Image: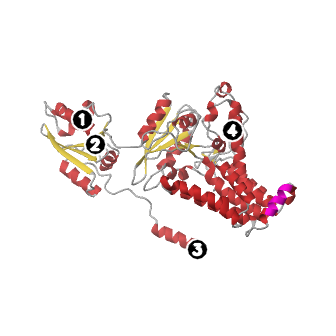
Amino acid sequence: MLFDKLKREKRHTYEVPKRDPGLDQPLSPTLEDTLARLAQLTGQTADLQVNRLEVEGYKLAFVMFEGLVNYQTLILGTASDLHRLLAGQKIPSCLVPDRLCQELFMAGDKKKLRSFEELIQFIASGFAVLLIDGSPEGVALGVQGFSFRSIGEPASENNLRGSREGFAEPIRINMSMIRRRMKTPSLRMKLLKVGEKSRTDVCLIYRSDYADPEMVRRVEQRLREVRLDNLMDSGYLRPFLESGPFSLFSGTGVTERPDTLCAKVSEGRIAILVDGSPYAILLPCLFSENFQSMDDYAERPYYAVFIRLIKYLAFFLTILLPGCYVAAVNFHPELIPDQLLFRIAEAEQDMAFPLMFQALLIHFIYELMREAGLRLPRPVGHAVSIIGALVIGDAAVTAGLISTPMVMVVALTTISSFVIPSLYEPVTLLRLLFILLGGTLGLYGVVLGLAFVGVNLCSVTVLGVPATSPETPLSLYSLRDTLIRVGWRQLGQEQFIISRTAGADQNGEPADQNGEGQP
């Protein structure tokens, strides 16, 4: 009954995002009618600027949004050429846009437009649109001059060696950073509009000589079918690109490093840039790539293997250690050495709460402090660490809420979770899940939970490519860059190319009888 009620309310209250009415109307040949219609569509917004002028008998108007245009380039570079182009022989007003597009060379980007939708999109992107009385067309001039955050070092993907550049918010800047690194003509960039209201620029990036055309077609189709009012970040698109059963793990990845994106695109992957977001989407993304970094390919192979082993160990440590500790103390004390067991029993005898509750409580306190540290302003953010040290390190133990061994277990677990930041979200929930399983079913529950997580991870596929490739299905040749990494003499002999699963359906799921595919 509850689900039926929710469905009825959703059906009555939710409406599919629709475009603004009147955007498909063409521009009027009369300048005053076009400006009046534009003012009606924008509601006479305060940042809309309309500069009227008359040049050689032609009535013109520059339309732009305040703060998005470089006025020096517009005045010195573009407006001064209008007298030269329109002087002399008189031409009809309907032919003025063609002449301006052909001979106006100061503007870097020139495009003709015919509808109000194109007009609003161009001026909202930093263009200045020139409207001519007597012509049903306008000319968009690329004189962008809006402010944006400069290119800086990535905040979430630090490295010791290699590039220090990270993506910025403007999509054109990010596209230029990729083109500067990959000068091959096979690099393709397709611009799409996503968002019924925001009309956000989305760039689909791939290499035509490596990427599978069918995979590119399906990704582009899914982007065109996205129905959202506003697209504010690349994270909005990830649910539309994934398919398959519910899983804590994702088949799509994100990066804010141009060199990482170029490396993945050279392996046959597809990248997606969103205007206004410094994070690019990579798909398909394999689970093993969460344990890799750019430093692995700049260091010696033996050291890269050592670091990857540490990352795999940290992953299993951070999800299993609290649950295994609770299960061993409550149900399997014979697995603990006698001296350690005596100390644990001595520490637990004065505690007011059972061990499982202690583990859940201290993890909840840690997540609470972490969230507070992220949201607080930086000048007062250090107060969270001071309070955390007092609460967890001293007051909680002294008050008998949490035992000392449990504090050590949580500290080691927390440090391990920082080693793989891209998996922090699933790791946090899995840690709590294994604490509950270990506290109720013992180590048997931990093993069953680990088996369930493994099966669920193997079921994740994106565009027909299993997230657990190349381990399952097994590809011995591709294992040279998973848990281990061979030297560049062998690694650079042949590129990794991900092709789509044979017989995949339109939703990107394998269509063979066993439900398995080959990457």
| Mark 2 residue crowding within 10 angstroms, few (<14) / some (14–19) / many (20+) | many
Q: Secondary structure at mark 4?
A: helix
Please identify the quarter of the rendering in which residue 228 is found.
Answer: bottom left
Q: Position of residue 440 (x, y in %)?
A: 77, 65
Which is nearer the eye, 243 or 330?
Answer: 330
What residue is pinned by disc 1? 78
Cα–Cα span, label 1 and label 2: 10 Å
Cα–Cα span, label 2 and label 3: 53 Å
Q: Earlier in the sequence, mark 1 or mark 3?
A: 3
Q: Is residue 374 visible?
A: yes
Cα–Cα span, label 1 and label 3: 63 Å
Q: Is residue 29 left or right of residue 425?
A: left
Q: Nearer the viewer, mark 3 or mark 4?
A: 4
Q: Nearer the viewer, mark 2 or mark 4?
A: 4
Q: Mark 2–mark 3 contact, CB under 8 Å?
A: no
Q: Which stretch is magenta? A: 339-346
Label total for image = 4
Q: Nearer the viewer, mark 4 or mark 1?
A: 4
Q: Which residue is at a point 73% across and 59% down the rendered structure image?
A: 404
Cα–Cα span, label 2 and label 4: 52 Å
| Mark 1 residue crowding within 10 angstroms, few (<14) / some (14–19) / many (20+) | some
Q: Main secondary structure of the magenta part?
A: helix
Mark seen at residue 128: 2
Which residue type carries mark 4? Ile
Q: Position of residue 44 (x, y in %)?
A: 25, 56
Which residue type carries mark 2? Ala
Q: Earlier in the sequence, mark 2 or mark 4?
A: 2
Which residue type carries mark 1? Thr
Q: Earlier in the sequence, mark 1 or mark 2?
A: 1
What residue is pinned by disc 4? 307
What residue is pinned by disc 3? 2
Please identify the quarter of the rendering in which residue 346 is found.
Answer: bottom right
